[in-house]
Image (cartoon, rainbow, N blue to C red):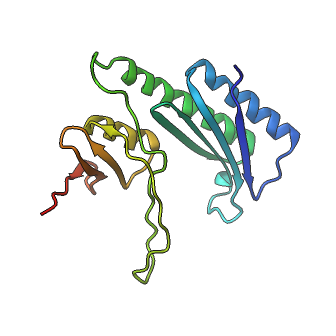
Amino acid sequence: MALEIGIYTKDLELTDRIQDYATKKVGKLERFLSDIGECRVDLSYAKTARNATDRFIAQITIRGKGFILRSEERSDNIFAAIDATVDKMTRQINRFKGKHWRKRVGEPEIVTPEIVEEIEEDVTPLIVRRKTFNLEPMHEEEALEQLILLGHDAFFVFYNVSTERVNVLYRRRDGSYGLIDPIIR
């Protein structure tokens, strides 16, 4: 079964050459991870980037049963950005497969929320965005792995199997991680 790849652009014209190149390169990821359900490629041009070598942005997001992997790279041309992003995704897949297949028998599969909530800070304390997502049960170690794999530096919300409560895993300023485990009074 051929991998279906959705290619989306922002401030960039999607030519046949770019589409064929991205489809060919990203399609090779299926060799490394066969159970990919959805693959999305976002290509954009940021003319206001501080550095001219960071103007073209390529981001790949792959979803499958129990995982979401994302990689993003910037370069001075779109083809180099696609290549760098595919290389980074290949490393992430290998790291994910290594951790996934080394699991002990009897542990639950690694699952993540379909959408990770992002908080936008504003000057006035107003709720400007509201998201809902499904929480899948997981252990703290799996949540930490997903936080790192998704590239979210701030936090990760998950349902902790051990405590049977919703927890928030976050990165501290010193680089270590903290866990918020709320208790209802």
Asked if residue 172 lies left or right of residue 115, the reply is left
Vertically, is 70 above or below 156?
Answer: above
Residue 6 x, y percent position in the rendering: 71, 40
Q: Residue furthest right?
A: 16
The residue at the point 68 percent across, 55 percent down is: 55
**Which corner quadrant of the image does residue 126 belong to?**
bottom left
What is the total number of numbered labels drawn onto the structure image?
0
Q: Residue furthest left?
A: 185
- Quadrant the N terminus occupies: top right
Asked if residue 136 lies left or right of residue 78, the reply is left
Vertically, is 122 above or below 106?
Answer: below
The residue at the point 68 percent across, 56 percent down is: 52
The residue at the point 73 percent across, 43 percent down is: 7
Residue 173 x, y percent position in the rendering: 28, 57
Residue 119 x, y percent position in the rendering: 43, 64
Residue 26 x, y percent position in the rendering: 68, 31
Asked if residue 98 lies left or right of residue 54, the reply is left
Please name whichever residue, 176 or 68, is drawn nearer the observer in this view of the structure.
Answer: 68
The residue at the point 12 percent across, 63 percent down is: 185
